Amino acid sequence: MKKHVTLSRRKVLAGLTGAVAAPMIIRPGSALAQSNSMTFVTWGGAYRDSVVKGVIEPFTAETGIEVNIVDTPDLAKVKAQVMTGNVEWDVFDAPGAMGASGEKEGYWEPLDESMLDVDDMTLAPTETLMPFYTWAGGIAWDADRFGEGEHPTTFAEYFDLEKFPGLRTFRDRPSETLEAALLADGVAPADVYPLDVERAFAKLDEIKSQVASWVSATPQTIALLRTGEVDFSYTYASRVRTTGAQSESGNIQFSFDQTLNGLEYLAVVKGAPNKENAMRFLEFAMRPEIQAATMELLGNAPVSKSAVPMLTEDSQSWLPDLSDPDHLVLNDAWWADNFEEVSRRFKEWVLI
Amino acid sequence: MRDFRQASIFVTPAAIIAICISALPLLYIFYTSVEGPDFSLGSYISIIKSTLFHRTLSTTMVIAVSSSALSLLIGYVIALHLARQPAKRRAFLLILVLLPFWTSVLVKCYAFTIILGRTGIINSALDAISGGQLSMSLLLNRTGVLIGMTNYLTPFVVFPVLASLLAIDPAVYRSASIMGARPARIFWTVTLPMSVPGIIAALASVFVMALSFFIIPALLGGPRDAMLSNLVDFYTREALDWNTAAAIGMILLGMTLIVVGTVYARNRRAAL
């Protein structure tokens, strides 16, 4: 009896030692890979292809630095890497709120502003976040079903069920949705932040019964319009442009009268194994010709001002005119501070 | 004692793996849920006060109970049918049960979107029959979740129930029918009571699995079908609040232990 117990304990100890030692054995691998490579975490599918063609291939051609691509930026994984000191990622492709919460938590390396041409940027970099592009969210409809004047073009009209009856979509998250509600309720875009959460939910109550889908996967915002499951949809200009071109059915249109504009950032993960290469990558991605080539493929708005004239005329027609005060730029810092609490309330509100 | 000694030899490797792979991380999750060395119950208290948690908990219970009941019903009928087949035929039919059982749950979910979707097989057929009058909303709602979960869980009912049905001595059936019992009577007084151990084993494992489902409600359900593990995902990846995520995980584990403990206690009593 006793013999078995000691045996198992020894085995447990051996197993434990193995488990503890494993990271130390695995780790030198990434150290070896240093100098001539880096890891870039970005989004999959067509997005990834565009970034590879627009940024990564010319970057590798110029610098000789190989870029390993990992799909799907996940802040929880950054948290785990930074917490355990086992950082594998270098550059992180962060949507606005994700980038800002990462900054708040201290997950990013500070930027060296001297390497960036800040005067050429439509939006200034923060201490750790480099704006990569902006995207425009707004109202879309099927022009074969709704002609001129039969569909909403601003958020006030999107919330007007009497004038434009029909089913709508929203994203399954409070960011964008609450802003849209406040704009609809008559708040001037300049006064939207800090968000009046009470007022936004009160306005959302008016429209809730007509929201057929709280969309979690972006392609759904277009797919639901196509299948006629909804009449009007909150979606993105780049989506309408890229899927509209490929479509054989439907004639999806997007309103540039009023849009919500979000930022996509590039950030270098704190303690990145190839920090120098990562910083070079950021500098490279901001060059006007690279910005223009990439955004031509992605369908989003470049942050580099001098990249805009380099875009084709068709691409330029798909960019919102941000100097028009009707458009709103999302405030990622506000969301970084309030995301958890407001999200919880939003999820509860959707469930009721 | 001898039994115990022998058992420990066979169980030791499994125990080592279990300790390294689940017990240690589990301890760490517990440690995280009480906010590490601070040992604070703050996360638990805020969860207990949270409406979101209450709603998700009740959704979880409703879905777990109804999908367990549905899969028991369907699985029992299948097992009953299998038990009455000659061994060779049964082996073939069992493969039909095992095939979906071996298929990845992700693949099954996507298959269901093709079958259940608005323009899917069922709705296209309804459309063709009714001339565009009929369509059913089967996806991204409770129906979709229940169909997906029942499909996943049914094999877990079939196996234990079949085992306990096959363990019934055929002589019992013979004597029942000699005594003049009709098939329905035999079922209610012989088959069903004697398969209770299988039913309980099946229900316990199916219910425990159903409690912690993640991917099926995420892919086939709507926002109103979020279950506790989806809430854990929200706190882990979106809110980055790992203390709360860990605390919900511990609560989920506690619920599982209660179910397993109840079944274990019942089995002990039955054995005595």
Image: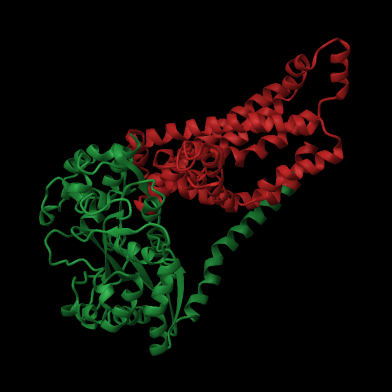
* Residue A350, position as x, y percentages in the image: 32, 39
Q: Colour of chain A?
A: green
The one nearer the camera, B252 or B228, is: B228
* Residue A183, position as x, y percentages in the image: 16, 50
Q: Quadrant of residue A71?
A: bottom left
Residue drawn at x 25%, y 77% is A313
Note the chain letter of the red one.
B
Q: Outermost residue toward the top?
A: B180
Number of marks in picture: 0
* Residue B169, position as x, y percentages in the image: 85, 24
Q: Is any part of residue B240 visible from this angle?
A: no
The one nearer the camera, A69 or B48, is: A69
Residue drawn at x 12%, y 49% is A187
Q: Is residue B162 left or right of residue A86?
A: right
Residue B253 vertical position relative to residue A194 in the rendered view, above or below:
above
Residue A338 vertical position relative to residue A87 in the rendered view, above or below:
above
Can you say which quadrant of the picture contains the C terminus of chain B?
A: top right
Q: Is residue B47 left or right of residue A306?
A: right
Can you say which quadrant of the picture contains the N terminus of chain B?
A: top right
* Residue A302, position as x, y percentages in the image: 26, 74
Residue drawn at x 33%, y 58% is A252
